Amino acid sequence: MRIVWQDHAKIELKEAVQYYRAHAGEDVAHDFRDEVRRLTRQLLEHPAIGVRLHREIRRYPLQDHPFNIIYRLTTEAVIIVALAHQRRRPGYWAGRR
């Protein structure tokens, strides 16, 4: 099992880190990035841990930041579909597979 970040999700991660760096400082940006890394490792160990949103899509919330990791499972990978801010328009990522 491996983690695969879709392109849109990579961009969302980069933008969130840049936002935290610019508005809250390097330490907060670093903490955010570390939390995302830690939770993606948890997804490798327990892929079904997230709440099922749709037939194949799951949500796993970050604990210290207002974001959800939106992902789907295959037999070979945990595919990160979005790193969605919890106050952003719900389901904006629904067309991604």
Image: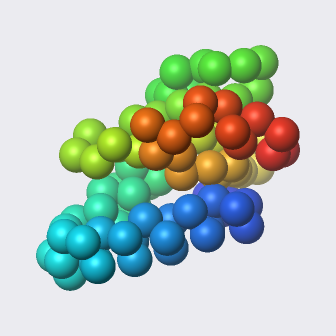
x and y, in percent, of residue 56 in the image: 76, 26
Compared with 52, 84 (above or below) is: below
Q: Residue at x 59, y 30 (%)?
A: 90
The quadrant where residue 71 appears? top right
Q: Nearer the viewer, residue 21 or 54?
A: 21
Report whether 8 appears left or right of 29: right
The C terminus appears in which quarter of the rendering?
top right
Report whether 90 appears left or right of 87: right
Instruction: Look at the image and tell me whether residue 57 can be seen.
Output: yes
Report whether 74 appears left or right of 9: right
The quadrant where residue 48 appears? top right
Q: Residue at x 54, y 51 (%)?
A: 83
x and y, in percent, of residue 45 in the image: 47, 43
Specify the color scheme: rainbow
x and y, in percent, of residue 28 in the image: 19, 68
Q: Residue at x 68, y 49 (%)?
A: 81
